Image (tube, rainbow, N blue to C red):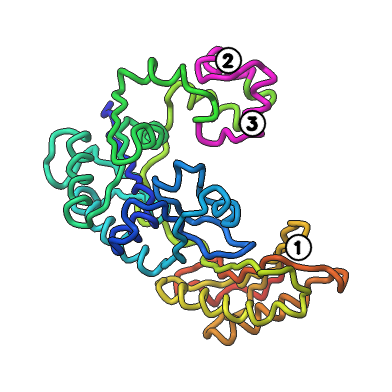
Amino acid sequence: MTVRKIVHVDMDAFYASVEQRDDPQLRGKPVVVAWLGNRSVVCAASYEARRFGIRSAMPAIRAERLCPEAVFVPPDFPRYRAVSRLVREIFKQHTDLVEPLSLDEAYLDVTENKTGITTATRVARAIREQIRQELNLTASAGVAPNKFLAKIASDWRKPDGLFVIQPDDVDTFLPPLPVGRLPGVGKVTEARLEKFRIRTVGDLRGLELPALEGPFGRHGLRLYELARGIDESQVIPDRPTQSVSAEDTFQNDVPLSETEPLIRLLAEKTWAASRKETRIARTVVLKLKTSEFRILTRSHTPTCPPSSCNELTSIALLLRERVDLDPHQRFRLVGVGLSNFRDPEEASVQPDLFE
């Protein structure tokens, strides 16, 4: 049986690194990519900012308190997407089996590669060097016989690091790790495992499959396999887009009647993003988050897909009318999305559906 060679490449502090690369005055400074405001969250933080405890998804106002001297830069996603495309072009020089996870990370299957480099480690080293030389950015990489181990490995020597888990090393590498390092083991699952006194992957290995399937169901099998370094999931290139969306948080909570301007703006952003797809979206989705953090969604699948930004906006505003709540209810966030993407020949054959 051929041992697979999987590389996980993760750009280091990607958005912040692009900002520092393009503006020399930001280099060496704690840079936070975020809009300033009470409701804004951190999109990325440079490693200088991370030393103060600043992390992605943290409220921007908290980041400002942690590091008053931090430089806040508003995100420029079109620029980040353009750089991400250049990174993927480098990947494609080595293999067509590239599965992007986001703008800043991807899996590569280099079991066979285009350049004839003899080992996966050397492929990863070559990719990192190309990114450094051609884009003046750094990336960390993990090399392993499967996807989940490669992802763990890429984080092992961040930033600007390379770590390899050889097949023969799996049984010594995994057992000491805390179970929280396994994919799918969040705080809830970790707390449930703690009740069984399962704290490390080695502890988890001590349980037979029936003991895990009882309390965890299907996820028990996944835990059983991951604890033993088993992950047969394939690197799937060019996954078709499932949805595109845009959302934003209000500076202050607002009643439903005052959401229209932002809905119109978000519909424009979503429509512009959807124009980059060759497939056609069938379903319009409106998302709202109340001041109590309750999330509401309304969706509509018209007989014919939306054919213009105006049509998308009209449907989104009609969906707003289906939100039947106390008129005094306030909302902190709104989002507009398109989903249910289909090939053009399939896009207009479904009947009208309300969900």
As drawn, the label of residue 184 is: none
Residue occupying image coordinates x 35% and y 67%: 79
SS under mark 3: helix
SS under mark 2: loop
Q: Residues within 10 Å of mark 1 (few under 14, many from 20)?
A: some
Residue interval drawn in magenta: 182-211
The x and y percentages for residue 50 are 45, 44
Q: Pointer 1: what residue?
A: 290
The residue type indicated by label 3 comes to Thr
Single out the mark in the foreground, 2 or 1: 1
Q: Report if residue 189 lies within the magenta region.
A: yes
The residue nearer to you, when weighing 60 against 181, is 60
Which is more N-terminal, label 1 or label 2?
2
Which is more N-terminal, label 2 or label 3?
3
Judge from the rendering whether residue 190 lies leftward or rightward of residue 6; answer left or right: right
Q: Pointer 3: what residue?
A: 189
